[in-house]
Image (cartoon, rainbow, N blue to C red):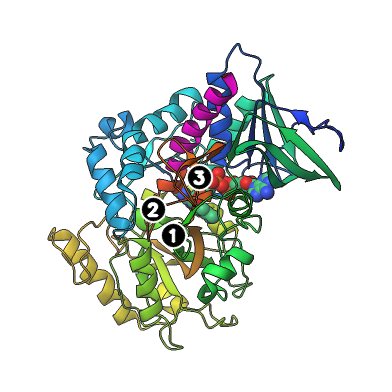
């Protein structure tokens, strides 16, 4: 379900003469698309053109894979649902999750613009971001996603957002998508960025520009940057597309950009292990929203071991500790054991209802989620003692009913764990920690300027947004904050690029 937007046009430039665009955007994920929309809006009536260069055949990037949603604090949707939230609370959650390494200036800007970002998507692109969940590390429900269609089909949130923006751009006469174009160099005119060189169809081409926006995403897909900064994670599977190789870091450091937080790589606790290919490197993500809807985590003996709504780093290290040995790690019956820590993810019927049967049915069709009718069948499928399983679920529900806090510090219990109807289905999966997001990247400021390593000043003509940047999320990104950063800082990069192009 990724890289879904068809190529619109190809560059008509020759390999000898540099073509011109007012603004060049590198990368067609959400950050690049948001930058393009805003740059066009801010240059209306001017004749300034915007070219978006994407190395894949289609736009979308990792943004198209996003499944849990986008954060907004104080949105109209939250108010409609009776959820009280504030900008200060989102900023505080973001910085707490960052473990003291996040930039308060960037977090403040992110939180301040969050409601506007969600409402921009809702009003400008008619996106129905009406389901709001409380995900790990959040003090309140604020992660917005799309509901299933009335006939029960899932509407993946990332795919929906990037499709809507790309469709909007396709109708813009001053916009050009150059697909299959890998940018290899940033060109300089003195100290100022003056364009890019790229490769397309075996030819090397140049495009001059008054401003360049880097929106090339992270480096969780593998390659040299990951090897250099997180060699200890090399054996882990990943949720990222193979295109996420940190190209923007190479491009920008070659013109003097500073890097920050490069060792900070987020391992998501729940990549699905598919019974038919348990050792596959690329894992389909088990959306955070599953745990937000009440999914529990169990070891192979049927014991809970963590607050499922803790931040990703905490849940990941709990799985590593509790589900690492051959007798505690979850596996599929009869399948090869890849030897990596893995847990069972379990939803009651109420949790499945809250998550939505459209998306759950999609996971089932993909062979990622399975169902078992009643506790006996569930215990048999998970190959654990029924009594231990029932004990864990009952203990969870007792604390939930008492409005109390459990032994893992869990205080939000979205749904009961035991089904009221003894014959009703439970839904389960095997999940394993997987490389997911790279917090490190280009040092940037709240106006999306890329900063120089030598003196911290902006590199003239160079902007960046999205996962290619670093410094906002510190040691650990809060769920839902990445789609948000793409919109907030992508739009800001577009705004700044427009100002440069109009001079
Ligand atoms: C499975 C999954 C689920 C996720 N779910 C969520 C979620 O629910 N909520 C949330 O907030 N975040 C989520 N994230 C994280 C989030 O989706 C990404 O961090 C974010 O979308 C990155 O957006 P981006 O625009 O920076 O990069 P991307 O969307 O990855 O786009 C970068 C694009 O740049 C292109 N590119 C790279 N190098 C070059 C080059 N040299 N020349 C030209 N083009 C280039 C790539 O091909 C790619 O298309 C999820 C991530 C994954 C992998």
The answer to whether residue 493 is magenta is: yes
CA separation, marks 1 and 2? Answer: 9 Å
- Which-is-in-front pick, marks 1 and 3? 1
What percent of the width, then of the height, locates residue 20? 74, 27
Q: Is residue 293 visible?
A: no
User: Mark 1 to mark 3: distance in Å?
Assistant: 15 Å
Residue, x 41% and y 67% (percent of image)?
345
Q: Residues within 10 Å of mark 1 (few under 14, many from 20)?
A: many
Q: Which numbered circle lies on residue 410?
A: none
- Residue at numbered disc 3: 466
Task: Name the foreground residue: 288 vs 9.
Answer: 9
Residue 76 seen from this side: yes
Q: Which residue is mark 1?
A: 261
| Corner quadrant of residue 142 | top left
Which sits earlier in the primary sequence, circle 3 or circle 2? 3
Task: Say if the magenta span includes residue 330.
Answer: no
Query: Residue 129, position in %: x, y?
Result: 42, 35
First in sequence: mark 1 vs mark 3:
1
The overriding secondary structure of the stretch rendered in magenta is helix
Image height of 243 relative to 89, above or below: below
Q: What is the magenta range?
A: 484-502
Left or right placement of residue 401 versus residue 32 in this view: left
Circle 2 residues within 10 Å: few <14, some 14–19, many ≥20 = many
**Quadrant assignment, res 484:** top left
The answer to whether the residue bearing label 3 lies less than 8 angstroms from the nearest atom of ligand 1 is yes
Total marks shown come to 3
- Which SS class for mark 3? helix
Q: What distance separates the C-alpha of mark 3 from that of mark 2?
A: 11 Å
The residue carrying mark 2 is 473
Q: Residue furthest top?
A: 45
């Amino acid at each position: 379900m990724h890289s879904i937007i068809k190529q619109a046009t190809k560059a008509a430039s020759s390999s000898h003469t540099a073509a011109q665009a007012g603004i060049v955007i590198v990368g067609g994920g959400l950050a690049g698309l948001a930058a393009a929309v805003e740059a066009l809006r801010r240059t209306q009536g001017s004749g300034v053109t915007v070219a978006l260069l994407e190395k894949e055949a289609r736009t979308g990037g990792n943004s198209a894979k996003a499944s849990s949603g986008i954060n907004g604090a104080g949105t109209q949707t939250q108010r409609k649902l009776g959820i009280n939230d504030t900008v200060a609370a989102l900023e505080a959650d973001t910085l707490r999750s960052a473990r003291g390494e996040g930039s308060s200036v960037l977090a403040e800007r992110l939180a301040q613009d969050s409601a506007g970002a969600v409402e921009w998507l809702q009003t400008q692109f008619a996106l129905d971001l009406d389901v709001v969940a409380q995900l790990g590390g959040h003090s309140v429900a604020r992660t917005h996603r799309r509901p299933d269609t009335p006939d029960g089909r899932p509407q993946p949130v990332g795919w929906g957002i990037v499709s809507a923006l790309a469709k909007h751009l396709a109708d813009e006469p001053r916009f050009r998508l150059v697909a299959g174009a890998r940018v290899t160099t940033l060109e300089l005119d003195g100290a100022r960025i003056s364009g890019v060189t790229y490769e397309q169809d075996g030819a090397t081409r140049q495009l001059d520009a008054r401003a360049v926006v880097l929106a090339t995403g992270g480096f969780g897909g593998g390659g040299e940057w990951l090897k250099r900064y997180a060699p200890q994670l090399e054996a882990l599977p990943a949720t990222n597309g193979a295109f996420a190789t940190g190209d923007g870091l190479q491009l920008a450091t070659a013109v003097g950009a500073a890097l920050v937080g490069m060792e900070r790589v987020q391992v998501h606790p729940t990549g699905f292990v598919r019974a038919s290919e348990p050792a596959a490197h690329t894992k389909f993500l088990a959306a955070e929203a599953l745990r937000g809807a009440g999914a529990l985590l169990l070891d192979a003996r049927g014991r809970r071991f963590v607050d499922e709504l803790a931040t990703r780093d905490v849940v990941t290290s709990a799985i590593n500790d509790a589900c690492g040995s051959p007798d505690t790690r979850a596996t599929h019956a009869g399948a090869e054991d890849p030897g990596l820590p893995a847990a069972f993810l379990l939803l009651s019927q109420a949790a499945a209802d809250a998550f939505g049967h459209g998306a759950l049915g999609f996971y089932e069709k993909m062979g990622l989620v399975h169902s078992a009718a009643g506790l006996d069948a569930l215990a048999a499928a998970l190959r654990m003692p029924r009594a231990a399983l029932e004990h864990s679920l009952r203990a969870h529900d007792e604390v939930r009913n008492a409005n109390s806090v459990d032994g893992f510090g869990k205080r939000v219990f979205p749904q009961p764990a035991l089904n009221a109807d003894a014959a009703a289905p439970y839904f389960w999966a095997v999940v394993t920690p997987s490389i997911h997001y790279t917090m490190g990247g280009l040092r940037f400021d709240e106006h999306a300027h890329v900063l120089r390593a030598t003196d911290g000043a902006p590199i003239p003509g160079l902007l960046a947004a999205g996962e290619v940047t670093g410094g906002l999320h510190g040691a650990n990104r809060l769920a839902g904050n990445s789609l948000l950063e793409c919109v907030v800082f992508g739009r800001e990069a577009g705004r700044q690029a427009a100002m440069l192009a109009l001079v």
